[in-house]
Image: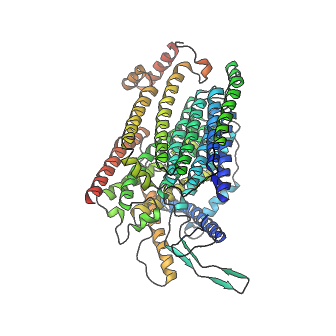
Amino acid sequence: MLHLTLFLFFAAIAVAGAVNLLVQRHPINSALSLVVVMASLAGEYLLLGAEFVAAVQVIVYAGAIMVLFVFVIMLLNAGEEARSKGSRVAILLGVPGVTIGAVLVAWVVLRYSNAEAVSMYALPGDPQAIARLLFHDFLLPFEVTSILILIAIMGAVVLASPPQAIVRRRRTEPAQHETRELAAAGKER
Amino acid sequence: MVPLTYYLLLSGILFTCGVLGFLIKRNIITIFMSIELMLNGVNLSFVAFAAHWHALSGQVFVFFVMVVAAAEATVGLAIIIAVFRTRETLNVDQVNLLKL
Amino acid sequence: MPAPHTDQRHTMSITTFIVISIVKSLAVIAVLLTAVAYSVWLERKVSARIQNRWGPTRVGPFGLLQPLADGAKFILKEDLTQPHVYKPLYIAAPIIALVFAITSISVVPFGNTAYIPEINVGHWFSTPEISTPFQITDLNIGLLVVLGITSMGVYGVALAGWSSNNKYSLLGGLRASAQMISYEVSLGLSLIPVLIKSGSFSLRAIVESQRHLHWNIFYLPFGTLAFFIYLISAYAETNRTPFDLPEAESELVAGYHTEYSAMKFAMFFMAEYANMVTVACLATLLFFGGWLGPVFGPPVLQMILPIIWFCLKVFFFMFLYVWVRWTLPRFRYDQLMAFGWKVLLPVAIANLVVTALIVALRA
């Protein structure tokens, strides 16, 4: 009974956050509702006995990836979304299509469902058990993902840095000439 | 006790909201966040099935999904910053020409 | 659901468990908030003595009632409402900062098990025998929970800087949050040698593995190195000198809390000192043996003495925080970030690799 109440509590918060992400016009509100969704999903993972995954969800997803999103929204000073012709067409076609697909998936899930309950104590979700799997059976994917992160870091640094001309000028010129040159560069671009 | 179906339905609802956000939103950052929402829904069904079939590899796979999501968000946001530098807009409807 | 038990021998009913948890939470929050208020007093007194002046002396003996006067001031000050801020996040940011600063105390153990015998007052009032640890909850992923809450604390700073709609606040907020997430990496990596030695994420198990003066800081040389990396990263994480450029007055007016006044500023202030208390608690638990110390005497004294040792060690770390603040000059922002990424992170990774090798070769 308590299990069902807690599940419904976290599920309600997650769905409310997801709907709020769609409804809000300003991206910062959407970002914060996504953080709420992730935190409530961490609660759901705890109800499934996956405590290590819940902690990692909070540390990595809600505490690092979403901070990155919030940074970019703050840096680019994104404003509210404006209604345009494209968005009206997307709503007219997209919402019915997705609803039909969702109803189909839900029907399949309910038809082949079994009322067997998922217990919180089904699995040992502690770090030792996961580490045993991660470093024995899944060692190759683990190493490959570390290389993937390295590539992502290098790609982000290269893509987000200012153009080479400005970097070269910053290294060789004092500050007051530099601002004049930057303004001129912006105008000619 | 909670049946497996409830977890799958919740995962499906989150995934549907993600797909809807991807289709109807015009701001590129919000579209990215809808992708993250879809990945979160999928993570939930991984963990639910791991508990249902007593297979811990479901939880291990959630790590890999998180890592891939982090890498993709990093590179995607860097691309958005680079595009913003030239086009000064975050609206996907206005990024429709290869060369300005 | 199985009945919750907090000790191997006794199980208790669910109402008793809930009542005890509520009592423990209220007690710990009250003590934490008082500690935060008096750490402000400590800072003013110690900084004054370092600078060869008196500090607060008028309000109560030795200025001990100064925090009360400060609290009254904050409550009675005019709460300026700016017209140009983004209202929802402007009000939410200090709440977020304070909530996450206070939450990490929930997994910190203060002492051993508390044992309260049965009380029977006639036939209409009786309490059962209670045996509960001096900790709100002993999670077996306690250390990860503290790291997670520290990661979430970045939102308070970033949102405060952005919602103030002020270029100094935005720059200060961005700098502070970039600094916090950079030093979080070396913070986490510096704690892994401790985990390898103790074999568990539970804070109680980590302290228990340091019995008989096997404190982690004496585990030369990698325990000491881990301790210093942890301390430097934690100082940068809590935005304290020598890493407090984002809130230095001479740099960015006041950084991310420029536009805040009265109660909201007080909440940021409290959040900063609560973070300091959390860092001090973690440092004693992970490196200095937590509540372990000479224990003697009757059972009541045996329950109280570990808490006293714990408080003394935490007090030493708070004193160290203030001492370092008023002794060292401040880092420039690019020096700070370069140090975090180019020096501290490689050293932390090297420390981790060598510790893992040594533990593996010894086993």
The location of residue C162, given as percent across then percent down, is: 60, 37
User: Visible in this render: residue C49?
Assistant: no
Task: Give the vertical position of A86 relative to C137 (above or below).
Answer: above
Is residue C14 toward the left or the right of residue C41 in the image? Answer: right
Question: Given the current orientation, which residue lies at the most extreme bottom position?
Answer: C122
Quadrant containing the N terminus of chain C is bottom right
In the rendering, at what x and y percent does residue A158 appear? 41, 27
Instruction: State the colouring used for the structure image.
Output: rainbow
- In the image shown, does B78 or B33 lie closer to the viewer? B33
- The residue lying at 67 percent from left, 45 percent from top is C91
Task: Please name whichever residue, A28 or B41, is drawn nearer the observer in this view of the structure.
Answer: B41
Is C125 positioned to the left or the right of C330 in the image?
right
Query: Could you say where residue C288 lies in the image, as x and y percent from the top left?
Result: 39, 65
Quadrant occupied by the C terminus of chain C = bottom left
Residue plotted at (31% across, 53% down): C356
Q: Is residue A173 above or below residue B67?
A: above
Q: Is residue C64 visible?
A: yes
- Residue B75: where, in percent of width, then height? 47, 30
Q: Is residue C56 left or right of residue C322?
A: right
B15 in relation to C138, above or below: above
Residue placed furthest toward the right? C124
Question: Which quarter of the picture shows residue C168?
Answer: top right
